[in-house]
Image: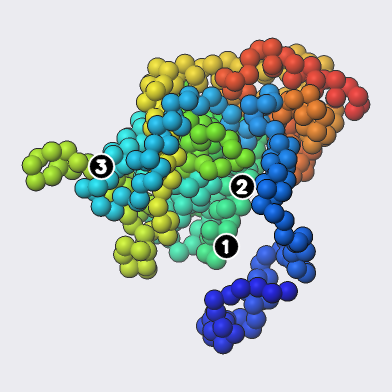
Amino acid sequence: MGYYSPHTEDEIRQMLSAIGLPSLEELFRAIPDKFRLKAGLNLAEGKPEPEVEQEIKSLSEQNLSCGRVKCFAGGGVYHHYVPRVVEYLASRSEFSTAYTPYQPEASQGTLQAIFEFQTMVCELTGMEVANASMYDGGEACAEAVLMALRVARKDRGRILLSSALHPHYQRIIRTYTAHLDHPIELIPLLPSGELDLEKLKSREGICLVVQHPNYFGVLEQMTEIQKICQEKDLILIVVVCEALSLAILEPPGKFGAGIVCGEAQSFGIRPSFGGPLLGFFASRMDWVRRMPGRLVGETTDRKGQRGYVLTLATREQHIRRAKATSNICTNHSLMALQAVIYLSLLGKNGLEKLAKANLERGWYLRKKIEASSELGLKFSGPNFNELVVELGVSGEEATRELIKDGILAGVPLTHHFPELENCLLVAVTELVDKSDIELLVKKLEEISRKGK
């Protein structure tokens, strides 16, 4: 099997020697064996470009976009309506071709948009300072943990995670901290789906990461959690995957969060097969120099006119690597721009109305499930626009059956939570109405009845 490498065999041996490994095989041992090629790619012979184009087109037509089905999938990426003007403005060449704004005199528009994004994140989260955005919510969450470790300045100590933190985020945190002397401990849940506060009281650590609403859609008792964190000297990191909830829930900054981070995809960004996404990150002002990523600030020029500059960009390309707070090289400025346009269009009142519409649909679905003789509500805690439905069949079987009727029924949970095999994580947004919810419940009841 042939491959291209810019390094000679001698250079490879030198690099392996420097890191103390005998072979490339040992270097890649961390990659699970099932994901590694045992032979060549076995590619077909080349074809004329028109034939390739036609084949790719036929493959793409097998995809079912959210616009072609009734979408009840959530789990960190949500199907909200994106006004046409959002993508129109964001795709203007001034923005889509803009280089990273190192030269402020040539990048005032981009810098102002980022500054507005930071301001909006602060207003929504109730925090004092926000950075210019992160790649996605999972990366923002892991960076929040690393920041908490820097703030605490403790060589040892546990990282406490809610068991209802997004499973992808949990895995990213484990990857980021794999070689640190800070073991991770999961705090279990109550039958309601909320964090077990009594178990939390018995744990010691440096920080606590809590998702609110959590991965199962349940709202946590954040005031009580903050009190426990304060008593036990834990840095409270609040993660928000459904950013729209911030429009009506108490801002995390109001109940003592040290860091607030999460996913802002709900603000004007389509699901698009799960990306690109938009991480946000906010903190207390006295911790600003320990924040990851870049931050845009407002200043004045020699004439006294208002302007914008990159105020902090604490990464290894700018300063000594040992003192860098992060190696994130940029921010998702185009996605952040879409969020700014979206939030500007809706305004405070519009965003609140939209959030209430989502809340009402979530409540309607909850009532329908509670009234059903075939379905059940897995967790009794309050929810925003997402909840876990118990079925008479596996969640995977339910989604396979309902997609035939043009319904993306939700997210099966068995992959990350084997004990929830017969459960489905269902989200409702403004893009489904009461009749859609009634149809979903009816179809789930029919499938559950057949499975019993």
Q: Quadrant for residue 57, please give it.
A: top right
Q: Which mark is residue 255?
A: none
Q: Is residue 390 above or below residue 148?
A: above
Q: Which of marks 2 and 3 is in front?
A: 3
Q: Quadrant for residue 415, please give it.
A: top right
**Three-letter residue code for mark 2:** His
| Quadrant in which the N terminus is drawn | bottom right
Q: Residue lying furthest left in this view?
A: 303
Q: In this view, does 199 lie to the left or right of 445?
A: left
Numbered disc 1: secondary structure: loop
Label 1 or label 2, whichever comes before in sequence order:
2
Res 259 visible:
no
Q: Mark 2 points at which residue?
A: 168
Q: Name the residue under label 3.
A: 108
Q: Nearer the viewer, mark 1 or mark 2?
A: 2
The picture places residue 316, in percent across and down from the top left corner, at: 37, 64
Q: In this view, does 401 lie to the left or right of 52?
A: right
Q: Is residue 310 above or below residue 318?
A: above
Q: Which residue is depicted at the point 80% across and 20% down?
A: 443
Q: In this view, does 22 lie to the left or right of 299?
A: right
Q: Which of marks 3 and 1 is in front?
A: 3
User: Mark 3 and mark 1: span between their CA atoms?
Assistant: 40 Å
Numbered disc 2: secondary structure: helix
Q: Which residue is depicted at the point 55% across and 26% down?
A: 80
Label 3 or label 1, whichever comes before in sequence order:
3
Q: Name the residue under label 1.
A: 178
Q: Which residue is depicted at the point 32% across and 42% down?
A: 110
The picture places residue 47, in percent across and down from the top left corner, at: 72, 56
User: Mark 2 and mark 3: span between their CA atoms?
Assistant: 36 Å
**Three-letter residue code for mark 3:** Gln
Numbered disc 3: secondary structure: helix
**213 or 101: nearer the viewer:** 101
